[in-house]
Image (cartoon, rainbow, N blue to C red):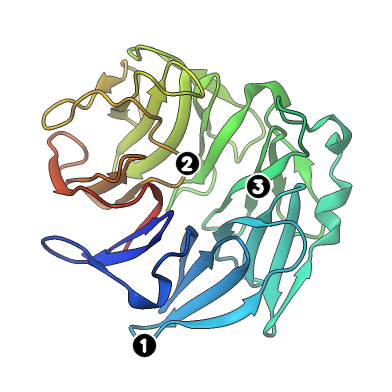
Amino acid sequence: MNILVGTEAGLWHGDAGTPEPVDAFAGHELTALARDGSRTWALVDGRALWVNDDGAAWREVTPIDGPAATCLAAAPGGLLVGAEHARLLRLAGGELSRLESFERVDGRDAWYTPWGDPAAVRSIAVASDGAIHVNVHVGGVARSRDGGLTWTPTVDVEADVHQVLAHPTQPNVVLAAAYEGFGISRDGGDTWAFVTDGMHAHYARAVAVAGDTVLVSASTGPGGRRAALYRKPLDGGGAFERCQRGLPWFQDNIDTACVQAAGPVVVFGTEDGRVFRSADHGQTWALVTKGLPAVRCLHLG
């Protein structure tokens, strides 16, 4: 299984052993990665959108003007691009344009950041039925069930969501990593519950689903200090358990978009340039590589 590792200074790839750098991106920050059929998309320096068509050479598709872009998601109507200033863009017909409907979400005036800058789109998830979930930091999660024509706010702004994730096969199941812990909705985002049982702290940054197992990162706060990855069955009760067979505690947060899963395989990357892999739903772990620049995003495919 090929692993793509986007970092603050380049892209690395590999399906076994130590990942190799991609020369086209040397010295450039890879902000986000997304897969759309045979295509892999990359957000470079927050200012350009690149694509790889089924293993061909990477090529730039379009520059990104205005506020810096932050995240990507493939959607039926075209690739979605999140950006600072809480903007949402769509690539359709080879052109990138603002999705102005997103700028009319109820409650948008209450979005904020603790440091005073405008809120930003932090993550985007598209469910298997086409529903779009857009996580704004700090602004909760807005949902569209009509391809982006209209939007409905779902999670309370003060939950402080850092990543939203749609279950790959169950469209009514939506997950979140937030200040309040692990969030789950079983009705497509209409109602939410937040869970922290078993965690040493409630501040969560990343979430992934590996088969019937959910994984979430948690730490003592925005600065990290004591961070770990946790796992539990997605269905049923029970507390989270810390992933510790092959993993230490971490000083920095395991961040948004830095934990990815496909079937039983899970990978995650760290601020200090390490990448870890599990082949058994997060029960045991092995170090894939170390010494990379700070990891910003990952993709499995």
* Residue 90 marker: none
What SS does tag 3 mark?
A: strand
Residue in front for this viewpoint, 120 or 190? 120
Q: From the viewer's perspective, is the residue at label 1 or at label 3 nearer?
A: 1
C-alpha gap between disc 2 and disc 3:
13 Å
Q: Residue at x 51, y 24 (%)?
A: 222
Task: Name which residue type carries label 1.
Answer: Ala
Looking at the rendering, in which quadrant would you find the N terminus? bottom left
Q: Are marks 2 and 3 in contact (CB under 8 Å)?
A: no
Q: Name the residue under label 2.
A: 256
Kind of residue indicated by mark 3: Val
Image quadrant in which you'd find residue 46: bottom right
Q: Which residue is drawn at 64% across and 61% down?
A: 81
Residue 259: image quadrant is top left
Q: Distance between the residues labelled 1 and 2?
A: 28 Å
Q: Taking 189 as reference, is 172 left or right? A: left
Residue matched to label 3 = 134
Cα separation, mark 1 vs mark 3, equals 30 Å
Q: Which residue is drawn at 44% across and 37% down?
A: 206
**Residue 146 seen from this side:** no
Left or right: residue 290 versus residue 93 is: left
- Count neighbours of disc 1 (C-alpha within 10 A) and say few if under 14, some if 14 to 19, many if 20 or more: few
Q: Mark 1 points at which residue?
A: 56
